[in-house]
Image (tube, rainbow, N blue to C red):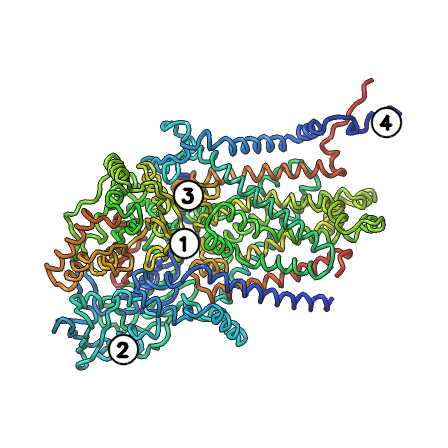
Amino acid sequence: MSDISSVVPSTSAAKPRGRVLFNYLKRDRLALVAVVFLAILVIAALLGPWLMGDAATKLGLRHRNMAPFQIDAGWLYVLGADTLGRPILPRLVVGAGNTLGIAAAAVFTSMLVGGLLGLVAGYSENWYSHVIQRGADIIMSFPSLLLALIVLYTLGPSITNLVIVLAITRVPVYLRTARAEVLELRERMFVSAARAMGANSARIILRHIAPLVLPTLITISAIDFATVILAESALSFLGLGIQPPEFTWGAMVANGRGYLSTAWWIAFWPGLAIMLTTLSLNILSSWARTVADPQQRWRLQTLKKAAR
Amino acid sequence: MLHYLGRRASYSVISILGLLTLVFFLTRLTGDPSALYLPLDSTPEARAAFAHLNGLDQPIYIQFWNYLADLLRLDFGESMRQHRSALEVALEAFPQTLKLAFVAMLLSLTLAIVVGSMAAARPRGLFDRIATVVSLAGASAPDFWVAIVAILVFAVGLGVLPTSGTGGWEFWVMPVFVLMLRPFGLLVQVVRGTMLSSLASPYIKTARAKGLARHTVVFGHALRNSLLPVITVAGDLSTGLINGAVIVESVFGWPGIGKLMIDSIIQRDFAVVQSTILVTATAIFILNILIDLLYAVLDPRVRY
Amino acid sequence: MNPTGIVSLVSAAILAGAASPVLAQNASHDIRIVLPEQPANLEPCGSIMTNVGQVLNQNITESLTVIDAKTGKAMPKLFTEWKQVDPTTWHFKVREGVKFHDGSDLNAKAVAFSIERMTGGKLTCNNMAKFGNAKLTVKPLDDYTVEIKSDRPQPILPTLLSVVMVVSPKTPVDKAVNNPVGTGPFKLTTFSTQTVVLDPFDGYWGKKPVVTKATYVWRQESSIRAAMVETGEADLTPSIAIQDATNPKTDFAYLNSETTAIRIDMDQAPLNDVRIRKALNLAIDWEGLAQLFGDDIQRASQMVVPGIIGHDDGLEPWKYDEAEAKKLIAAAKADGVKVDTEIKLIGRNGIYPNGAEAMEAMMTMWQAAGLNVKLVMLDVADWTRYLQKPFPAERGATLVQMMHDNNKGDAAFTIPIFYRSSGQYSSLSDPAVDKEIDTAMAATGEAREDGFKKIFRQMRTEIVPDIPMFHMLGYTRVGNRLNWKPDITTNSEIPLANIQFKN
């Protein structure tokens, strides 16, 4: 008997959960790199303004658009300077906070709201499920720029309002995806079984269906992060995004738009930062999906050999 | 089914009317348009005359009443900028965007399904990793960046494609490519995700145990059942393309409805804002109905 | 190292012999012009708007007079001579032998028709802005003589008439048209969402232009416009951003009659103290700021460009002196002025290239000098509320980013709106100044010029109601086929008759 048990993955042992997760991470090198990168970003977001705040906002009109990889002006200028001569590296570090904060807030809010509404709309066919769906349709048809203009014009250009605008425009995709999954899931046997056992709708939705819908929503949210950052960039280009002297990576990219052939680095570095962040989030979400799914987890587990 | 369609259609009409009402009132909250149509040094009398000529000096409820009355006669108002019927302006621009969005979406979806499925077939393998990195890089790159760099490289540098404008197939290559990036990137990930779940199901194991070839299993069986969320996301992306191909339209000079809408919003050309939203909303609502019908076709468990 | 440069070098060999998708225009004299934005419409009464004027002016429709850029004086076009009979009456002679594109004749009645269409009020006529509140009465005296009476003395009526575009008497008076019929050397063939095409008009009264067909397209991105001229897809673009003007053989800068400035709201504390206003001017590193706009940019000391009647050539602009600025602020503070009050710097998105950067830079400089300045970037409609009367009541202390265009040769189009108490942009309210302005406006010749110069000097040295920044430059890119250089009027018109070819 003990021979058989020696090839069973040792999840039943009383290992602390963190340790288990860390082992999973070690098995997937790319996910490990992604986590490290994101950790660095979070540290930059938290400590950046304190460490490099001055460097990021100091004007240097005499070295506008300075090219990267020259260290004469100091190591801070290694990535070049922007249109007002401010060094790009410190601006990336300081901008991480605003960028990640706004994007995370918007994505999280829209995923929560959209996901819940979609669950409700998909599970039953009453009047309020129709109202929710038509509401989603209306939001989808309402041009996001107009929404941004209206909110920002009437309520003023603050970060909160910006997050609200960005969140509202992203709600429909989560709503409709959640609804689509629920439509299919509600006909499955485990739902009828739960109902037969007397579970009410709310319990079925939240305890049984939601966990199955979550992975797809998380997959979408990882890329949605980039969509929100770039949407903010488009708003910045039109002057409706974050207001100077505050800035995000998206605003930096928007500023560099007219210089792509002459000073490519202004838009390139923040664009690269956005790309790497999205990549990391996506790899991480894909890894998390594998960990969370009992049928996939085996890919990240090692076989434990029993002592002989 | 017909009953369902009838209900959806009537709900949609109500929603569109609700949308137009919302847009009507909200856009008029955004300031006096005369600043944009008259030179900055115009006198207050000139501004008052402009407001009067365009019916902007009346109380908003009267303006709304007139708007509804005009709608019943199918008169959607006149563009303050172009001095033409607002609906005509919107209907001229819409096909340009539709063409571009359709081609881009079709290509993205097909490629994403192929690439996503192949990536899911061997997760964390080399193909999967490369596909993930490439698709995500495309999806998170700022579209104007890709567009302008593509133009600089292919049109100015190599001279093999025209810089911009509409025309034969060579004018479509770069705009479609740029438009495809985000949909392709997102769809690859979604397909991969849902395929991973499907491929782990018992019936797939059965199919493999029966000895079916890998590609039959992946494409013939697993794919069909993963498509629901994929179609949803694809549908959402399509509507995003219709409303949001602005960058591509403005960089490449395609006179599409995205750019028209943005310009009208910035210029406070209310009639055109309303007519463009009407046109795109109708298209979006029709698209959503089609997608819901598609759910039923693809998955017999979905019943209306 | 510019990656695009490398690619261009490497692909030069590939290019030589590769079939290019460029239209084969080289043999003919057809040209292609790429504009920054689509002309919203082609209504001749709106020709002072850049995107309309650049296509229409002197090409499809012509004006009654034109301004000589160097002297600022009115020159004949469709009016050949004129004289002022009394302070409110002028007589003009109409050019004979001119036909419209639809065959009608140009005569005194047709001129009266055009002017009445403009002033009639049945359609929105933007060009009327230049006339302010003046009322004109037009009377044909005979077939080729017109009498124009105004309700108040108009010493520069011929200058004002340079905005009147003459249209065929068959043009509707109560609605705007998109198919204008004028007397110009070209007629309109096509106006679509993608292009405007002009073909030559054989019955033109003047010299036949060399250009045989003009196609206009539009692209919003400056880098794309520059690329199109570079690849040969277009022959000319009248406007590219300064950073795209990298090739001295094809890229030409020109003074475009725009002056940038910051308008100070003199009603609100602490801006109502002249020391603060002077400090605002002194605290800016003007040389550094100029870097945003290019090496050729001219510093402005007053709100009109050199060449305009009334421009004081001897007036020096403010110099950078942070120490002096700080001293003034300290002195004001000592007298109880609340220098810490938040001052809102109101920027306008897209007003001019690098406008937002300039505002950020100026805000930072003012903060360094000790003032509490906060930047708010607004879109056009919102910004206009702060620019013009009536100003919003709860605005607080504001500084408004603005740009003023005067290419009509005379400071009369600038001084009243900026400095008179009734002026649209003016936060000044000084009866003595008003009287000086009115006197100068009614004067002619040297008295007029000197009157205007005195007012500009007073503003610069004593009253300081604004912060003049720069006289702006426009940049054009001209393809290899053409022999053409821009001038100060290029911002408002591109007469195809001035375009020659290199052969």
Q: Is residue B59 left or right of residue C129?
A: right
Res A79 seen here: yes
Q: Position of residue C353 (x, y in %)?
A: 35, 49
Q: Earlier in the sequence, mark 4 or mark 3?
A: 4
Res C167 seen here: no
Q: Which residue is mark 3?
A: A244
Helix, strand or loop at label 2? It is helix
Give the alpha-carbon distance from disc 2 to disc 4, as whole Å: 104 Å
Q: Amino acid at mark 4?
A: Ile
Please tell me whether mark 4 or mark 1 is closer to you in this view. Answer: 1
Helix, strand or loop at label 3? It is loop
Quarter of the image containing the C terminus of chain B? bottom right
Near-viewer residue (A204 or C55): A204
Q: Which residue is mark 4?
A: A4
Near-viewer residue (B169 or C141): C141
What chain is tagged by disc 2?
C
Q: Is residue A136 left or right of residue C206?
A: right
Q: Which residue is mark 1?
A: C379
Q: Which residue is mark 2?
A: C113
What chain is tagged by disc 3?
A
Q: Is residue A128 left or right of residue B75?
A: right
Disc 2 to disc 4: CB gap under 8 Å:
no
Q: Residue at x 81, y 27 (%)?
A: A7
Say yes or no: labels 3 and 1 on the same chain. no
Helix, strand or loop at label 1? It is loop
